[in-house]
Image (cartoon, rainbow, N blue to C red):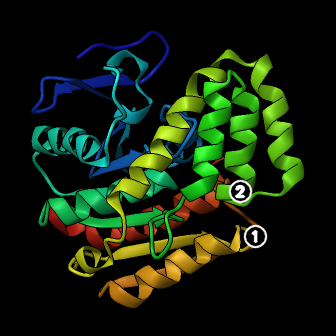
């Protein structure tokens, strides 16, 4: 375990396949594990966890899918990512509230299904889980072709416009920024791999129906319609859910409305975690 300068503790452990696992570790109290979405390394949760650290210990996993240092020439699967979550669960060895955003929420669903009893509850912010046709499909193939042609900006624009279903203007603005920011160029292929990993998981609603811990299904009022439809599908099959909609927010409330997101997470944390710490 090492402590970065002017930052949180970096919690480290090793997964079953020998790869390193790392998570930003802050605060104290009942433990919450945060799984980030695409084009990220865990920093997108920082504004939210800063509002929770006085009452909860928060772990922000740097997901294996977005770890360039773990690239081995093959695409990272959701199953491999679950093993990184499992390693942290084993290390902490106490009930955890798991929180995921976007593809990180799909990872949270897979972890919940794979590790019954490991989690006290979950907050799932718009997981783009497969409920019918593939998430990426032909659009992902076009985005990958653009990436292979050395056009990461165009690849990201296709992903945002045709898969995320963001407004075309926002998609192309993001694409225009890719040449200016090395970090975006570096993460763009990981984003496409993340989408492919979700498609490989396929429809798992039957497995998710067996998740019986309290789950908050969080969505934004202004998010793309398909994300709400995926929450609808989860709400229909999962036995112990609460639906929360953030007014005047979309898919980026972790950055734009961190107080409100933290309030939702803390509410579930108070409900399901405090009894485990008595």
Other-residue count near label 1 (Cα within 10 Å), few / some / many at <14 / 14–19 / ≥20: some
Specify the quadrant that holds the N terminus: top left
Question: 87 or 233: nearer the eye?
Answer: 233
Q: x, y (%) of residue 115?
A: 14, 59
Q: Which mark is residue 162?
A: 2
Specify the quadrant that holds the C terminus: bottom left
Q: x, y (%) of residue 93?
A: 10, 46
Question: 93 or 233: nearer the eye?
Answer: 233
For the residues bearing labels 2 and 1, Cβ distance under 8 angstroms: no
- Mark 1 sits on what residue? 222
* The quarter of the displayed image where residue 39 is located: top right
- Taking the image as shown, residue 72 lies to the left or right of residue 152, namely left
Q: Count up the numbered dots.
A: 2
Q: Secondary structure at mark 1?
A: loop
Image vertical order of residue 25 relative to residue 37, above or below: above
Of the numbered discs 2 and 1, the one sitting upstream in the chain is: 2
Image vertical order of residue 181 relative to residue 233, above or below: above
């Amino acid at each position: 375990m090492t402590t970065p300068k002017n930052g949180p503790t970096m919690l480290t452990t090793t997964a079953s396949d020998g790869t390193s696992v790392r998570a930003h570790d802050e605060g104290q109290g009942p433990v919450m594990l945060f799984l980030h979405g695409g084009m990220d390394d865990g920093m997108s949760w920082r504004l939210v966890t800063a509002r929770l650290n006085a009452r909860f210990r928060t772990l922000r996993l740097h997901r294996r899918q977005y770890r360039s240092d773990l690239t081995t020439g093959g695409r990272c699967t959701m199953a491999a990512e679950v093993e990184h979550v499992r390693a942290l669960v084993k290390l902490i060895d106490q009930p955890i509230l798991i929180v995921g955003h976007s593809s990180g929420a799909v990872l949270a669903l897979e972890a919940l299904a794979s590790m019954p009893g490991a989690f006290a509850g979950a907050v799932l912010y718009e997981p783009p889980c497969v409920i019918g046709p593939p998430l990426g499909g032909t659009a992902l193939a076009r985005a990958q072709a653009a990436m292979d042609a050395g056009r990461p900006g165009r690849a990201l624009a296709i992903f945002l416009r045709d898969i995320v279903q963001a407004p075309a203007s926002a998609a192309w603005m993001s694409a225009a920024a890719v040449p200016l920011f090395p970090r975006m160029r570096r993460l763009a292929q990981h984003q496409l791999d993340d989408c492919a990993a979700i498609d490989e998981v396929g429809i798992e609603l039957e497995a998710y129906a067996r998740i019986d811990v309290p789950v908050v299904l969080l969505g934004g009022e202004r998010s793309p319609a398909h994300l709400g439809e995926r929450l609808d599908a989860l709400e229909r099959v999962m036995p112990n859910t609460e639906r929360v909609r953030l007014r005047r927010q979309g898919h980026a409330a972790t950055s734009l409305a961190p107080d409100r997101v933290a309030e939702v997470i803390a509410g579930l944390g108070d409900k399901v975690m405090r009894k485990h710490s008595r």
